[in-house]
Image (spheres, rainbow, N blue to C red):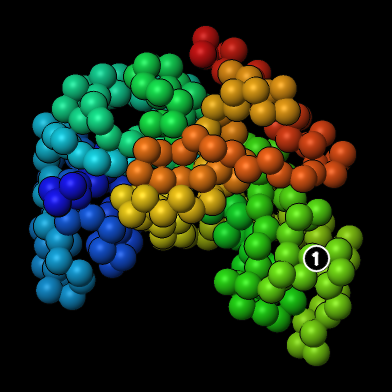
Amino acid sequence: DARPTKLAIIGAGAVGTAVAYASLIRGVARTIALMDINTAKVTAEVLDMSHGLEFVPRADVIGDDDVAVCADADVVVFTAGAKQKPGQSRLELAEATVGLTKKIMPGVLEVAPNAVYIMVTNPVDLVTYAALKFSGLPNSQVFGSGTVLDSSRLRWLIAQHCDVAVQNVHAYIVGEHGDSEIPLWSSATIGGVPLTHWKPLPGGEPIDAAARDRIHHEVVHAAYKIIEGKGATNNAIGLATARIVEAVLNDEHRVLPVSTVAAGYEGLDDVCLSLPTVVDRAGAQTRLEMPMSDDELAGLMSSAETLRGMQAKFGL
Ligand code: LAC
C-alpha cells in the first residue's frame, strides 16, 4: 500500500506532544495529525514542530480542534484526559477519563474506522476496555500502551544494577499499568542468561531478593516520583508509544507488553491488562504463553481483580 502513512494523536497536552515529537524523530509516519479542542495549543504545537521538519525524516505535521483532522489515519493514539496530580493514583483518574473516552471515540471512529487505536490515557487498562466496548471494534484493533513503559523502567534499573546495556536485558512487567503491576523475574534474562543464573560482573551487583524488591518498588513508584519532581511524566511515555506505533505501521510482529482484553488467558476474561503480545499492522492479538511462577501468576490474578473491580464501578 503506497499511500503515505498517517498517525493521528488525540490530545496535544504533555503526553500527546511527546508522542508526536518522538514519532517525528523516529520517522514513524509520513503525516502526523494532532487534534485538541484547545485551538491555540494545537496550533502552536503544530507550528513549533513544523519549524523542526528540516532535521527529521520527511514528514508533515498538521493539527486542528476538529476531529476531521484525523481522517483516514492508520493509527490513532488517544492521550486526551487528565494527568495524575502528586500523590494521586492512575486509577483515581478513571471517573474523568472513561467518560471522556465515551464522548470522543464515536467522532474519531467516524473519520478513521480502519485505524489501529492505541490508548495511552490513564488508567490505560480501563480506558482501553472502555474504548473497546464503546467502539465495537475487533479486540486486536484497540489496545493500550500498558506496561511497555514500566517494562522499560524495569530493564533500565536491572541494567544499571548489573552494569550491562539496557538492550541486553529482557524482562517484563505485566498486569495493570499501575500499583498492582507484576515483574516477571522468573523469565527475565541478561544477554540470554536467566537472571536466576546471573553471576555479578566486576562493575555490577548481585540481583538478589533485596535488589529485586528495591527495583520492583522503584518501577511502581517511578511515575509518582517523576510527577512530584517535574510536574508531569511525558518524555518516556512519548518514546514508548512512538515505538509501539512503529511496530504497527512497519508490521514488525514485535513482542511488546501492551494492554489487551484477556479473552481466556489463564481463565481471565472481560478485563484489559498487559502481557507480552505480538504487535503488527492489524494491532495486537496474539499473546505469548509466558511461563510464570505461582507467585507471579497469583499477582497477575490479583491485578486482574483490581481492574475488574474498577470496571464494575464504571459499569464497564
Ligand atoms: C507513567 C504514566 C504514563 O507511567 O502512567 O509515566
- Residue sitting at x 59%, y 33%: 273
Name the side, left or right, on which 172 lies relative to 281: right
Could you say which quadrant of the image residue 132 lies in?
A: top left
Report x, y in % for residue 199: 86, 78
User: Mark 1 packing: few (<14 Cα in 10 Å), some, or many (20+)?
Assistant: many
Q: Which of these two is toward me, 246 or 300? A: 246
Quadrant housing residue 202:
bottom right
Going by the image, does 86 lie left or right of 296? left
Q: How far from the left and from the top, in percent, is residue 215?
A: 74, 60
In which quarter of the view is residue 213 placed?
bottom right
Amino acid, disc 1: Leu
Residue at image position (26%, 63%) is: 27
Asked whether mark 1 lies closer than 8 Å to ligand 1, one says no
Q: Residue furthest front?
A: 1
Note whether 9 is above or below 45 in the view shown.
above
Q: Is residue 262 above or below residue 182?
A: above
Number of callouts: 1
The location of residue 239, given as percent across then percent down, is 41, 60
Residue wearing tag 1: 195
Q: Residue furthest top?
A: 315
Coordinates of residue 128 in the picture (x, y in percent): 46, 29
- Check the image and report above or below for 192 versus 127: below
